[in-house]
Amino acid sequence: MAEHPAYPVGLRLSGRRVVVLGGGQVAQRRLPALIAAGADIVLVSPEATPSVEAMADAGEITWRQRRYQDGDLADAWYALIATGDHEANTAASAEAERRRVWCVRADDADRATAWTPATGTSAGVTVAVLTTDARGRDPRHTAAIRDAVVEGLRDGTLVAPHHRTRTPGVALVGGGPGDPDLITVRGRRLLAEADVVIADRLGPRDLLAELPPHVEVIDAAKIPYGRYMAQEAINNALIEHAKQGKSVVRLKGGDPFVFGRGMEEVQALAEAGIPCTVVPGISSSISVPGAAGIPVTHRGVAHEFTVVSGHVAPDDERSLVDWPSLARLTGTLVVLMGVDKIGKIAETLIAHGRSPKTPVALVQEGTTAAQRRVDATLATVAETVRAEDVKPPAVVVIGEVVTVGPRPAP
Ligand SMILES: C[S@@+](CC[C@H](N)C(=O)[O-])C[C@H]1O[C@@H](n2cnc3c(N)ncnc32)[C@H](O)[C@@H]1O
């Protein structure tokens, strides 16, 4: 059997009986994919690992709690033989052969009639890697090839454009707080497939340098807007490029819908009849404090966190934030765009009941090489920001969570 290469095929197992013999580690690893394929799974085994047992409890598989016996493969289309008993495995694979059921054998690949490839998925595609014969089988090597292909597709270093399905339009991609590793897998793939990228000042700017030369990169901050508002000019640029049939990525810092004006762009595109995909991003409001050792919640300390914009002062009539109510809360306050107005914000919180001793941290340029953290209290923060020359972009964290982590190394 091993002289010829294996023939690769994709089994469509939905509603079809698959028999798994043995409830140990092999079953535990293989069952999730069989469940995902919709197979009607019968497990025959006197014991099972806690994870396999949980699958039976959840009704995802039927567990016959006994040893294998002849006839167990009667209705099977496919079998996975993985008991710890070599004799039982041999008897079961003989039954599989007799009944013409394709079978995988965990203990003896040479005697199996099917092999499980190393698999991974990326954007709706399954990558499956098989060695050509049983003697050359090297599971680590096939897994490494699988990882290289899947990772390459995910992070965009292996570019496989969707020639048939790729629809021109706009992807609104949340790029995360700044570290290029903190964009989502989907965001990075769409970036790798883009013809045009319109990028903000914040976010993973380093990724732009990796784009191939034919990709047009437009700095959103530099779009000339003449008599238009800047946002309208950006909307128009998105629409114009998409109308030319190009794949456009609008790369934004953090998450597009957290103080990112993302929905305004979605609305403008919808009005223009342009398809738009939104890819969430890691918001700086949680990740930047986290990168500086500050959890936004902590058991016994803070059971809530509130994210607010500090771009207008509390006494400004345009402010939509109810600062007096926030002052009465005991949880964490995360203020974005608040560096310039931090003095007024701290004053208002103290005036409405927050202790002047409440710890405050400012994290500037979080997750980048220039990240720095400055600590203060509500009483001292305005002076500290001046003395330490803290500049935007920075996230301000107010609350007891600031002091729960280990102190950062000096
Ligand atoms: C217009 S808001 C956009 C927020 C973004 N959509 C998000 O989810 O992170 C910009 C503000 O986010 C914060 N910010 C974004 N990236 C940051 C970073 N890497 N370090 C510190 N603050 C950051 C700053 O408060 C900045 O003024």
Image: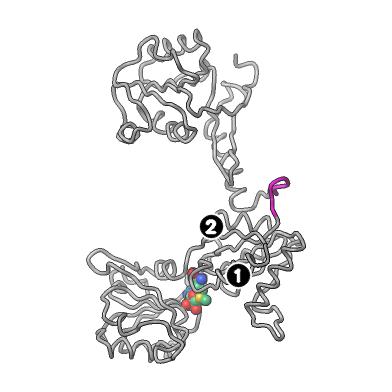
Q: Is residue 29 left or right of residue 268?
A: left
Magenta stretch encompasses residue 294:
no
The answer to whether 253 is drawn above or below residue 60 in the figure is below
- Dot 2: element: loop
In the rendering, which numbered label is found on residue 184?
A: 2
Kindly give the residue lying farthest to the top in the view shown: 98
For the point 64% across and 52% down, the residue is 157
- Dot 1: element: helix
Magenta stretch encompasses residue 164:
yes
Q: Is residue 301 left or right of residue 121?
A: left
- Depth check: give the residue in front, 117 or 75: 75
Residue 63 in which image quadrant: top left
Tell me the magenta residue range.
161-167
- Depth check: give the residue in front, 93 or 221: 221
Q: Is residue 238 left or right of residue 406?
A: right
Kindly give the residue lying farthest to the left in the view shown: 300
Percent of width and height locating residue 74: 44, 12
Q: Is residue 368 left or right of residue 379?
A: right
Percent of width and height locating residue 154: 59, 50
User: What amino acid is labelled 1 in the image?
Assistant: Glu
Q: Nearer the viewer, mark 1 or mark 2?
A: 1
Residue 147 in which image quadrant: top right
Percent of width and height locating residue 326: 31, 80
Residue at mark 1 to residue at mark 2: CA–CA distance: 20 Å
The answer to whether 347 is drawn above or below residue 295 in the figure is below
In the rendering, which numbered label is found on residue 44?
A: none
In the rendering, which numbered label is found on residue 265?
A: 1
Screen quadrant of the C terminus: bottom left
Screen quadrant of the N terminus: top right
